[in-house]
Amino acid sequence: MYELMTSDEAIRLIRDGDCICVNSFVGIENPVELHEALYRRYQRMQSPRHLTVVSSAGFGVWDENRNAEGYIREGAVDRLICGHFGAMLSTKKIVLEDRFEAYNLPLGCISHAIRAQASGLPGALSKVGLDIFVDPRNEGPGINRLSIDDTLIKYVELDGEEYLYYKLPKLTVALIKGTAADRKGNISFDDQFMSGDALSICQAVKSNRGTVIVQVDKLVDTPTRPRNTIIPGCLVDAIVVVEPEKRNAAYTALTGSFEIPYEDWSSWNEKIDTVSLLQSKNSTAGNIIGRRASAELRVDDIVNIGIGLPEMVSRHARKSGMLDNITLTVESGGIGGFPVSGEAFGAMIGAASVYDMANQFDLYDNGGLDICFMGAYEVDEKGNVNAHRSDGAFAGIGGFANITARTPTVVFCLTFNTKGLEVTQKKGTVNIEKEGSIPKFVKKVKSISFSAKRAIQNGQKVLYITERCVFRLTPKGLKLIEAYPGIDIERDILKQLPFPVEQ
């Protein structure tokens, strides 16, 4: 039977050495008060310590002094296992400083491993991750020199097929953010942007005789409809009621509490972008790339569009009218709406459905998308892509590996180089005014997020769309298939590459 507690009381249920699983998605739906209560206790008692923290998609709030950043930075955590670190501003830097073990696994593979543990299985098989950095035959999932645990991912062969086997430590504490708890402790998520892995996390923790702690905005007398209950009260140990922070009116569009017609998606997206800490950027190069990439869309496509430059694809799909003829998806579980960017990434405007995250990755892993648009830090002569590791910081692979592993058409959106690149376009003619000082096309990527070898084996169509040209992946490497008007192939493309390409 659950108990109502303050956040400080609930955190006392966490013991030294516990493995905490956090339900959140990048920067949204974090149980902030629970994290900060844990930090207060750690400052006061130096306990709990020796913690392991697991999260499919990370658990930051774009503020290095809030949420879990403090207790991670000050030594409460021995091991961190995450799909993405982007919103964890302090943590994504110090993971490279060898202060604690840190592992980066594909987001969907963590989600599926949690669900496997909930069903009594030790782990989950997947073809996602083969031949990229997490494959133990390559680098493995460890981020720094301390991270040498070889039990998290194993290469296995079964019935003549190759797989990676993902196994998480036993989860003993769940930290969850929901909307409301009724008198029986049932938890609904009506005002949340998503429910993520919430149910699977609770089932896994309870199967391990652990503790489920849920932060909610309110208590209600009238139970929600049974189908709307995400976590049944029998799985909950402690409920902490915390009055929610005041949310800008624009963000109410993301809860699904009222219908947003297709024709209003654009205006709501602009409202959200205006109040976001991380506003979308507009650039000539981005517009060129987004316009060309959006031409790859076909009617009735099921689509995933990544953050950063790929977001320009949706803008140009809207301008051309194609947006009304495709179905967009986002990793957190939303389908059939318009994904937002910035600090609320993971939420959708006008979603048709928002289901459990593991179900979304069932779709992705099984090739259920028709096309995806992804960003890239680097591309090498073989066509391999690094999208997770840049100099001085570690963002993480997120859902990138799952999305690109089986999707029939994969489109990478990137500038030819960066830091100082200046591009203009007049009447369809592109001019490179100044080259950037950091190349994006290199002889060999620092780390492999996308395996060209595996894509060729899978028969995937892979394009690399830049502000000046388009490459296609072939068994020999990159092939230049298109140069834009105004671009001198020899000067602007071939001489800028550190390797030869087929033409």
Image (cartoon, helix red, strand yellow):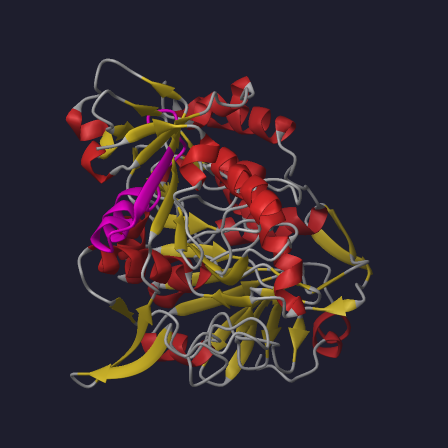
- Residue 297's place in the image compared with 164, above or below, is above
Image quadrant containing the N terminus: top left
How far across and how far down the image is residue 341, in percent? 54, 40
- Magenta region: which residues? 190-214
Viewer-side residue, 205 vs 428: 205
Instruction: Tell whether 147 sits left or right of 285.
Output: left
How far across and how far down the image is residue 372, in percent? 43, 55
Residue that appears at 65% across and 73% down? 441
Viewer-side residue, 223 vs 385: 223
How far across and how far down the image is residue 27, in percent? 53, 42
- Residue 218's place in the image compared with 386, above or below, is above
Decide whether residue 203 is among the magenta residues: yes
Q: How many marks?
A: 0
Residue 460 visible (yes or no): yes
Viewer-side residue, 286 vs 220: 220
Instruction: Tell whether 175 sits left or right of 182.
Output: right
Residue 484 visible (yes or no): no
Residue that appears at 66% across and 77% down? 442
Q: Residue furthest front?
A: 45
Image quadrant containing the C terminus: bottom right
Viewer-side residue, 293 vs 169: 169
How far across and how far down the image is residue 51, in percent? 47, 58
Residue that appears at 24% across and 84% down? 157
* Residue 19, quarter of the rendered image: bottom left
Decide whether residue 229 is among the magenta residues: no
- Residue 318's place in the image compared with 86, above or below, is above
* Residue 221, quarter of the rendered image: top left
